[in-house]
Image (cartoon, grey):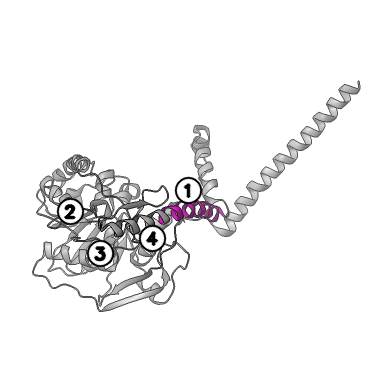
Amino acid sequence: MEKHLQKVEFNKKKRIIDVIFLVLIFLIIISFYIALMIRGQKEESITENRALNKIPTFSFASFFSGEYQNKLEDSLVDQMLFSEKIKKSMNQEQAETITGIQRAITKKFHEEKTEQGVTNAEYFPIGNKNVYYYGNSDYMVFKCEDYERSKIVIDKWAKTYNPHFKGLDTYFYLVNTSKSIDFNNIDKDENKFVTYIRSALNFKKVQGLKINSFEQYKDYFYETDHHWNYKGSYQGYRDIIQMIYPEDKLIEPIGTKTYDVYYYGSNARTTSVYNNKEKFTVYKYDIEDCPTKIDGEYARYDNEDLYDRGEYSKEEGYNHYGGYYGEDYAEVIYERNQPEKENLLIIAPSYSNANNKLISTHFNNTYVIDLRHYINTYGKNLDVDEYCKKNHITKVLVMLGLDLINTGIFNLDI
């Protein structure tokens, strides 16, 4: 009898504990939703440089298929309070420990090499994120892609491009990032990837950003980002217009402006190493604004006016390249209303964000398509021929880095 009473008492306590546990879980979930209602859902993770998962819309179909539960789990992790700070702290602690050791090794290595009279530098990994310091520089770079492997990928990529541009006046420009440059053996005449791409594409002209030395690379690219800086993007604009319209007069900068904020780019965000102290600087131009459509709606694309008023984020790791020049969208259209000039289609990722406005001054209407977002926005792949006929486009510019060619993200699989 006594054992029975003990068992009953135990079961009673267990039920109470279970109820308390369920109530606590319920309160946590309710608190989470209330906090979200007050704070709102976050769009982007600065630490991880990606779009965050949002709370999914409930439907019985998605619930019974399990899709709702999977999306909810991902969104709870992403939208959890203080999740960004927790991830950043963990990444920083790991990266600082690893990088501290590596920088000490780097310093010793260069002291020994200097004594031996050896000038050929080395790549030193930062953490385990495939980002490197080159030599004793503070610039964060990638290693050059394997040339023989890339040739195979370029051939496959070109086969998806050549048929869709037949009969069109098409140009290609390689944004020559550290993924297409071996700093220990820089091509002095022309980058070998540019040469090979020219042989694979049936385009009118193929060129690339010329980099003659590591010092020139540092002049054209941000210390902690894979994007080109104001000097690099301006040189890209000059190269492109001289390739398409050699006789056209180029827009010249009227000065530079440096904003009171340090710029920590994608490589700093990836590695969580925020040691560099590079202020965000841009060229200023005397260019009139024009009507601009973003994914079918009229809106301003860049945020130059906000930056000039001091209205920009001071958060460490904020993407000022996108914040100033404009974010990535499926379609951006510049309506210059210069009917005596041709219409241009630009197929490009974020590299073109910094010089789309400059390029557009040489054309009537300029259409900028980012294939990474086009199918998600419009529900179909881009049909180049149909798009050009519809918009009376006579010139096409494809602007890519080797990274996007090798990953296949910009393939035209129509």
Identify the amino acid type marked 2: Cys
Helix, strand or loop under label 3: helix
Whether residue 368 is visible to the viewer of this picture, yes or no, is yes
Instruction: Give how far apart the Cα atoms at labels 3 and 1 are.
Output: 40 Å
**Residue 90 colored in magenta in the image:** yes
Near mark 2 (Cα within 10 A), the count class, few <14, some 14-19 or many ≥20, is some
**Of pointers 3 and 1, the one earlier in the residue sequence:** 1
Residue position for label 3: 215
Q: Nearer the viewer, mark 3 or mark 4?
A: 3
Q: Is residue 99 left or right of residue 255?
A: right
| Residue 158 against residue 308 in the figure, above or below | above
Magenta-colored span: 82-103
Viewer-closest of 357 and 86: 86
Identify the amino acid type marked 3: Glu
Helix, strand or loop under label 4: loop
Helix, strand or loop under label 1: loop
**Quarter where residue 21 is shown:** top right
Question: Which residue occupies 37% across, 69% down?
Answer: 303
On the image, the x and y values in percent for residue 193 come to 17, 50
On the image, the x and y values in percent for residue 37 come to 58, 56
Majority SS type along the magenta span: helix
Residue position for label 1: 53
| Residue 263 against residue 205 in the figure, above or below | below
**Of pointers 3 and 4, the one earlier in the residue sequence:** 3
